[in-house]
Image (spheres, rainbow, N blue to C red):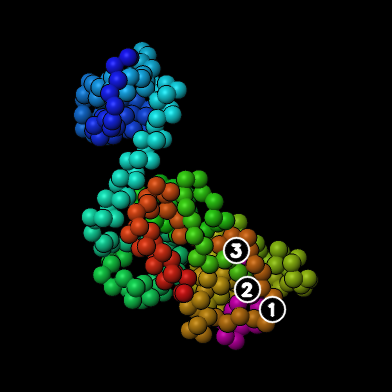
């Protein structure tokens, strides 16, 4: 291709090229834009003629980017994202809605107590929540702003810490250390870890075991025993006097509660500012 023009190619050609490169084929790009495969192929051909370079290798089983196409794709993606972001900042409306997904226990313990603070900062923004049954379900969840439990490292996602996990022996009023222990199965440290880290050797027996911190805290609230409870998730019960901390050491876990979102979703200043205000409310700053 020796025909070459100087200047910027038509935006439509660049958008189709970006989709074909990102999705790995002309058919997928055609579906994204509601075009025929022939129309996508024509736009790519026009772009290649404009640049005087071949961007895709056409083969019987499909297409693949050339070395020049691989070099050009991230430049086009960055430029399109910058244009979209700056257009939104200049002409877009302020966000009117914030939607967040998470486990129901996290929505209850972290989001609901933060709503009053958030509405002081953003009185015109409506908050919607989507609860999931298991943490693994968040990977398939369409709501992109999510509360997750872990260490803050999820591929392709940005994350800001809401609260570190702190585990504390707690029980209902009138229940003391002689009561049965409430076990919790899962990735959090348990009573054995607590004993090892606090040099406690004489543990009361355990008569029940749960796979949910929410259920373990609920059992303790009903006076059934002593739970190694999550401070972030038990705050409302502790403030209301339904649970009390025992005079025993706490255990700092390596995990925590995070507000997360896909890296590409929070590019505009308005979107980032909305997330920052929500995070401020969640932290109680």
What residue appears at the point 51 percent right and 70 percent down from the top-left corner?
A: 233
Q: Dots 1 and 2: beta carbons under 8 Å?
A: yes
Q: Which residue is mark 2?
A: 168
Q: Earlier in the sequence, mark 2 or mark 3?
A: 2
Location of mark 1 (residue): 248
In space, the residues marked 1 and 2 are separated at their CA atoms by 8 Å
Task: Judge the density around disc 3: few (<14), some (14-19), many (≥20) Cα neighbours within 10 Å.
Answer: many
Q: Is residue 224 left or right of residue 2?
A: right
56 is higher (above) or lower (below) than 72: above
Element marked by disc 1: loop
Q: Are marks 2 and 3 in contact (CB under 8 Å)?
A: no
Label 2 packing within 10 angstroms: few (<14), some (14-19), many (20+): many
The residue labelled by disc 3 is: 184
Say few, some or many: other residues with alpha carbon within 10 Å of mark 1 (under 14 / 14 to 19 / 20 or more): few
Measuring 38% from the left and 59% from the top, which residue is drawn there? 272
Residue at far front of view: 6
Front in this rendered view, residue 239 or 56:
56
Q: Nearer the viewer, mark 1 or mark 3?
A: 1
Q: Secondary structure at mark 3?
A: strand
**Dot 2 lies on which element?**
strand
Which residue is at a point 62% across and 73% down the rendered structure image? 168
What segment is highlighted magenta in the picture?
A: 169-185
User: Separation of disc 2 and disc 3 at Cα?
Assistant: 13 Å
- State the residue at coordinates (29%, 27%): 6
| Mark earlier in primary sequence (1, 3) | 3
Mark earlier in primary sequence (1, 2):
2
Quarter of the rendering containing residue 11 = top left
The answer to which quarter of the image holds residue 32 is top left
Alpha-carbon distance for marks 1 and 3? 18 Å
Query: Magenta segment: does it hold 178?
Result: yes
Q: Tell me where residue 133 appears, x and y as whole percent.
A: 43, 56
> Is 175 positioned to the left or the right of 19 in the image?
right
């Amino acid at each position: 291709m020796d025909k070459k023009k100087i200047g910027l190619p038509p935006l439509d050609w660049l958008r189709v090229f970006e989709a074909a490169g990102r999705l790995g084929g002309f058919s997928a790009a055609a579906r994204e834009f509601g075009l025929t495969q022939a129309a996508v192929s024509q736009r790519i051909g026009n772009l290649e003629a404009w640049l005087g370079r071949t961007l895709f290798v056409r083969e019987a089983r499909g297409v693949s980017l050339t070395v020049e196409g691989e070099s050009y794709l991230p430049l086009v993606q960055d430029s399109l994202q910058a244009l979209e972001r700056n257009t939104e900042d200049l002409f877009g409306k302020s966000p009117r809605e914030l939607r967040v997904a998470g486990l129901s226990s996290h929505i209850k313990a972290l989001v609901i107590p933060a709503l009053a603070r958030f509405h002081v900062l953003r009185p015109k923004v409506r908050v919607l929540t989507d609860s999931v049954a298991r943490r693994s379900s968040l990977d398939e969840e369409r709501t992109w702003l999510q509360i997750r439990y872990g260490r803050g490292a999820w591929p392709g996602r940005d994350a800001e810490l809401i609260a570190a996990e702190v585990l504390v022996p707690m029980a209902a009023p009138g229940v003391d250390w002689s009561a049965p222990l409430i076990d919790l199965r899962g990735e959090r440290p348990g009573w054995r870890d607590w004993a090892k880290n606090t040099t406690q050797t004489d543990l009361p027996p355990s008569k029940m075991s749960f796979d949910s911190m929410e259920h373990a805290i609920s059992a303790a609230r009903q006076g059934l025993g002593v739970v190694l409870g999550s401070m972030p998730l038990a705050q409302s019960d502790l403030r209301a006097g339904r649970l009390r901390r025992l005079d025993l050491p706490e255990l700092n876990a390596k995990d925590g509660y995070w507000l997360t979102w896909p890296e590409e979703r929070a590019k505009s200043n308005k979107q980032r500012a909305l997330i920052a205000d929500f995070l401020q409310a969640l932290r109680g700053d």
